[in-house]
Image (cartoon, grey):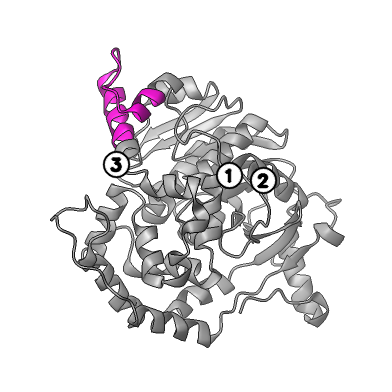
Amino acid sequence: MITIEALETIDHDRRRLLTMAAMGLAAASATPLLPADAATPAGKDAIRPFTIQFPDDALADLKRRIAATRWPEKETVKDQSQGVPLATVQKLAKYWAGDYDWRKMETKLKALPNFVTEIDGLEIHFIHVRSKHEKALPMIVTHGWPGSIIEQLKIIEPLTNPTAHGGTEADAFHLVIPSMPGYGFSGKPSAPGWGPEHIARAWVVLMKRLGYTKFVAQGGDWGALIVDQMGVQAAPELLGIHTNMPGAIPVDINNAALAGAPPPSGLSAEEKHAYEKAAYFYAHGLGYALEMHHRPQTLYGIADSPVGLASWILDHDYISLALIVRVFDGQTEGLSRDDILDNITLYWLTNTGVSSARLYWENKLAFLATKNVTIPVAVSAFPDELYPCPRSWAEKAYPKLIHYNKLPKGCHFAAWEQPKFFVDEMRASFKSLRMT
């Protein structure tokens, strides 16, 4: 069971510590890290501590359901063209029902400062970790689908405590890591209206409620669309954004890729490669997105079957799936078996398979095309993203491009799979904005 502890039942010292952490007053520091006049929100705007605790019965039920899986026959091909291989899912299920221990991840999550606050009638959960360094830059980091706040856990310590991880005080960030509506520990919308544009506005409300008058934003997958929308809306408090899934494909070229047309004439070799990757994804990798866009409520099976949920989550894109297949074959990659199952288990225990899918139904924006962002933008191009964004497209899509870098390794889940590269990119991306 997940409970939000009533404040009157929390002892005075713990309440004071959590409230100070939420508002960024850093109990361990002698120097206040927010303006002295930052007020603690009250009423509907209150920031409340959030406790994570799932009962043993929920974990026992999970293992019982995995053991009761009715398996289909093996795929009729030797590659992944029909979806997630049976052998991979059976290896995952065996480990999930056996040696895997959710409590290890739960302990990590419980050690972090978790909070909830109500925005536009919906409970929003977030992790808020402040740096001990006085001039740290506030940053809100947004996950995607099929991800969660678990994607960002590896970057928290090096970004908030850079001097212990090869950086300097000037590299420090204060981090806010929210669960999107319908995901993780956030509330599930009961009516339409929570698309990327609304979430973008809500994130500005959240950061201002925490007392931040200037901040930056980062996102990948849905997080990338959300930070792009934050850039379109251009709140005065927002200094700039970083994306590792840039919406940078020119509209006419994106439309050609969607239609499955040959590469347009005049593309450079780098642009042609990016076009071919995007066109392949549109032709062969969008099945899950189309189903969730059109009929998310139909996905009852992923709310009832852990193995059904796991298979649905694994089949995001062919490069990430190939990595996961290698992981369950025993190879060492940027993700581990526990990484993968921690994320899936969070979806299962919070029953957010269907509620998270509704974001696709809400969305009216193109995933990868330009969005008319007007503020400073940093782009990190990971080679195994859905498409590797060329600098030429990034410069046209983001007129105020302040950073662009091509990384040697990394897939769609950059912060999760390649946290060292990701941390280095955050430090470099926003360096020029720290004195703004």
Does the residue at mark 2 contact the one at mark 3 (Cβ under 8 Å)? no
Circle 3 — which element?
helix
Task: Residue type at mark 1: give it.
Answer: Glu
- Give the magenta-colored segment's residue range: 254-280
Q: State the image quarter where residue 277 is shown.
A: top left
Residue extending furthest toward the left: 78
Is residue 71 in the magenta section? no
Residue indicated by mark 1: 362
Where is residue 217 shown, x and y percent of the image?
59, 42
Q: State the image quarter where residue 283 is shown.
A: top left
Q: Is residue 308 left or right of residue 295?
A: left
Residue extending furthest toward the top: 266
Circle 1 — which element?
helix
Dominant secondary structure (helix, strand or loop) of the stretch shown in magenta: helix
Residue indicated by mark 2: 193
User: Which residue is located at x 58 percent, y 27 percent?
Assistant: 373
User: Which numbered disc, 1 or 3, marks the residue that appears first in the sequence?
Assistant: 3
User: Which residue is located at x 75 percent, y 58 percent?
Assistant: 118
Residue indicated by mark 3: 284
Judge whether 60 appears above or below 395 on screen.
below
